[in-house]
Amino acid sequence: MRAPTRRLAGLGTGLLLVASLLAGVGAVPSYGEGGGSAQKKAVQKDKRIVVSWKGEKKRRVYQKSANVPGIGTVDLMCRPKSTQVRIRPNSRAPETQLWMAKFEEKAGRDVVAVKNVRVYTYSTAADDGRGGTGPRAHEGLNQKPGIEDFQKGNAYGVISQRPGRNRAGLGALTTPVTSFKLTWWWERFDYPGHQYCNMALTLHTDTARQFGLSWHGTAEGVAQASSTTAIPGVGDAVVTCEPGSNAYDQTVAFRPTGASPEASFLDYEYIQGEGDVDVHVDHVDDLDYDPVTGLLGPVDLPRNGMMRLWVSVGGVKRAYVLSSYYVVNNDQNPALNSCEVAATPLP
C-alpha cells in the first residue's frame, strides 16, 4: 500500500485557472437533462422487495420493482429463463452505476465477482453521444448460459449517479446514494411444475450519512481533489482523489468525533475482480486512530472495485459500502481522466 500523504505539486497556472472556473459551478440535485437548481433534498428510506413462487400457480409473480430515490427504479426478476437485477434510471444523460459484489459457490469453491452495471449516454468526455447504453442495464445471477437447475447466492452493492462524463463531475455527490443487499435461491428449474424461486432485495438510502467524490478531466480534478463530509455520530469522511501519473493520493479516511476519538478504530476490506474469495477479498482489522493527523486512515481506494468499511466511534460500529473507479494517469489526454467514488451505509 502506498504512503497516503503525498500531494500534487508544480501545476501550471493555466491548468489552475481552468480548475478555478470549474470550481464555481454549482451542484444540482438532479443530473438529468436540463437539471434544475433546487437544493439538495434529504432522504432516509428503507425498502424490501421479495419475488417468491413455486409449482404451477397460474398467477406467478416473476418480477418486483422498487424506487431508487433520485435515480430511477430497480427490478428484481426470477423467471425460469431469466434471473437478474436490473436498473432503469429516469434519465440516460447522467452516469448511473450499480456496483455489486456477488458471493456464490462454483464447482465446490467459494467465489466472488465484482460487477459494475452502467447506464449512460457519454462513455468518455470525447464521446459524441452515440457510444452510450440503452435506457436500462442488468446483471444476471446465473453462472452460465441458460439457468442452472439449482443456484443460491448473496450480494451487496451501491447505486449512485453523477453527471455524464461529457460534463464536470461537480465534486461531492448531491443525489442520493442507495445501498442494497440481495439473496437468491432457486431449485428444480429443470422440472416444470416443481420449480421454486425466492429472491429478496433490501434497499437503504440515507443522504445524511453518504459521502463521495466525482470529477471528470484533470482540470476539474485539480479543484475537486478532495471532499469532506460531516457524518452524524462519526465525524468527517474524507475522500481524496488526486489526478496525476506519479505519487498521488486516491484514499478514504475518517476524522472521528466525540470525547475519546483515540478509542476509535477502522476495519475494512477490498473486493476486486472475480475468482476465489480468499484471493479477491482482502480484509484488514483494527486500524488505529492516529493522534498526529486525527484520522482513521487514510487507506487506498480500489482503482476499479469495491470496499466495505466498519468505522467504530464512541463504542458504535457502523458499516459502509463503497464503490470506486478512477483513471488519473492519462497524460496524453487529461480530459479523459476521471474519478467516481460513492459510499453509503449498508442496510
Image: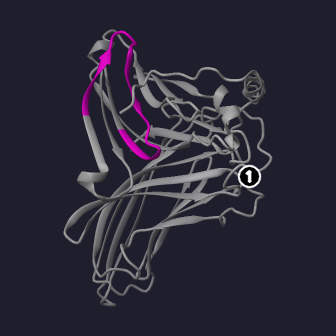
Q: Quadrant of the N terminus?
A: top left
Q: Inspect the magenta stretch and tell me whether residue 296 lies in it.
A: yes
Quarter of the view holding residue 220? top right
Secondary element type, mark 1:
loop
In the image: residue 334, left or right of residue 73: right
In this rendered view, identify the residue nearer to me: 250 or 183: 250
Q: Inspect the magenta stretch and tell me whether residue 226 lies in it.
A: no
Q: Position of residue 31 (x, y in %)?
A: 70, 45
Q: Which residue is mark 1?
A: 126
Q: Position of residue 158 (x, y in %)?
A: 47, 48
In this rendered view, identify the residue nearer to me: 49 or 280: 280
Confirm whether residue 47 shows in the render: yes
Q: Residue at x 37, y 77 (%)?
A: 144
Q: Which residues are magenta?
A: 285-308
Q: What secondary structure do most residues of the magenta stretch adopt?
A: strand
Quarter of the view holding residue 169? top right
Task: Name the kind of residue labelled 1 in the image.
Answer: Ala
What's the image's color scheme? Answer: one colour
Q: Quadrant of the C terminus?
A: top left
In this rendered view, identify the residue nearer to me: 34 or 145: 145
Q: Position of residue 3 (x, y in %)?
A: 39, 25
Q: Residue at x 58, y 47 (%)?
A: 69
